[in-house]
Amino acid sequence: MSTPHLSVDRERCIGAGMCAMTAPDIFDQDPDEGLVLLLDAEPSAPHHAAARLAVGVCPSGAITLDEPGPGGS
């Protein structure tokens, strides 16, 4: 089974902080700009649900989650 991969678009981020509040082990906010900081691009299994939720609550759509299909590709 392959690990999901997260990526962020800091140009698109509006600094709402929903990701950091939803998944603090995966995301933080830059203290100067308030924009998203990706702490873990390939979160472990216990953090997959939080990663998916953070993608869904991001108001600007700045977070992308690439989840491999059932075959692992």
Image (cartoon, rainbow, N blue to C red):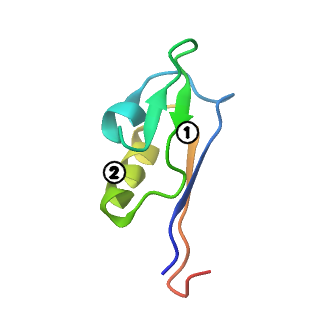
Instruction: Out of 5 and 60, give the one closest to the viewer.
Output: 5
Residue at (41, 36) in percent of width and height:
19
Q: State the residue position of label 2.
A: 50
How many residues crowd mark 2 within 10 Å: few (<14), some (14–19), many (20+)?
A: some
Q: Using the image, determine if residue 68 lies above or below residue 31.
A: below
Q: Vertically, is 2 above or below 37?
A: below
Q: How many marks?
A: 2
Give the residue type at disc 2: Ala
Residue type at mark 1 is Gly
Identify residue for label 1.
61
Residue 49 screen position, x and y as percent: 33, 57
First in residue order: circle 2 vs circle 1: 2
Element class at badge 2: helix
Which element is circle 1 on? loop
On the rendered image, what quadrant is the C terminus found in? bottom right
Q: Residue furthest top?
A: 32
Q: Residue at x 56, y 74 (%)?
A: 68
The percent coordinates of residue 35 (x first, y second) are: 55, 23
Q: Nearer the viewer, mark 2 or mark 1?
A: 2
* Residue displayed at 58% across by 14% down: 33
In-image side of 22 versus 68 (left or right): left
Separation of marks 2 and 1 at Cα, in angstroms:
16 Å
Q: Taking 70 as reference, is 46 left or right?
A: left
